[in-house]
Amino acid sequence: MLADDAATAADLEVPVTLLDADLPLPSYAHPGDAGADLVTTVDVELAPGERVLVPTGVAIALPDGYVALVHPRSGLAARHGLSIVNTPGTIDAGYRGEIKVLLINHDPVEPIVLRRGDRIAQLVVQRFERARFVPVADLPESVRGSGGYGSTGGFGPTNEQTKETSQ
Ligand SMILES: O=c1ccn([C@H]2C[C@H](O)[C@@H](COP(=O)(O)OP(=O)(O)OP(=O)(O)O)O2)c(=O)[nH]1
Ligand SMILES: [Mg+2]
């Protein structure tokens, strides 16, 4: 059973429709948690390496200027290798459809069995900035410059599985 998430008047109000009345609203396990847990409405078994788009029974209407991000749950990742292909998934403010989660089983050997009502992911609601992309000839200088992808050090050479395309 989920703990009472103790919503307060200070919390952002987000209208939700439950497409499956027997399952719960997204719910925070503890006060102060960033992620509200989402459940699967279906039983599903993921073979090793398999990905499945799983329904959550929830549709929301975020206010303009907000986004909801669908993150994996670390316990399921650590214990079973369960993650999300497109992590974090982006729920746009204008989206009124059912939130779905593209789960993947990263375990090389064991299948993962999920039951209807299991908590499979967590939704983090955030404000965001819209950018006005302004073309310029030269970007302002910075200390980092164009160094990236391990420019500050790492361990070992790049694995040959990492392919890079050149122009
Ligand atoms: O994990 C996710 C990610 C997205 N969506 C929904 C909400 C989101 O607003 C919409 C579109 O997502 P996104 O923009 O990431 O996908 P796209 O491939 O760019 O699709 P579109 O062309 O519809 O924008 O799909 C989900 O239900 N779950
Ligand atoms: Mg899109």
Image (spheres, rainbow, N blue to C red):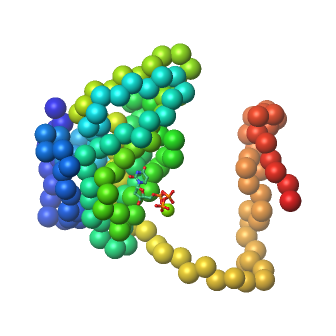
| Residue 163 in sight | yes
Q: Quadrant of residue 76?
A: top left
Residue 13 shown left or right of residue 89 in the figure: left
Residue 85 locus on image (x, y percent): 51, 41
| Residue 11 in sight | no
Q: Residue furthest top?
A: 109
Q: Residue at x 23, y 41 (%)?
A: 29
Q: Quadrant of the C terminus?
A: bottom right
Residue 161 shown left or right of residue 128 in the figure: right
Q: Residue at x 17, y 40 (%)?
A: 23
**Front-most of residues 122 and 53:** 53
Residue 57 shown left or right of residue 167 in the figure: left
Q: Residue at x 29, y 70 (%)?
A: 63
**Front-most of residues 106 and 99:** 99
Residue 56 locus on image (x, y percent): 29, 44
Q: As displayed, is residue 113 above or below residue 101?
A: above
Q: Quadrant of residue 16?
A: bottom left
Q: As displayed, is residue 42 above or below residue 8?
A: above
Q: Residue at x 35, y 28 (%)?
A: 44
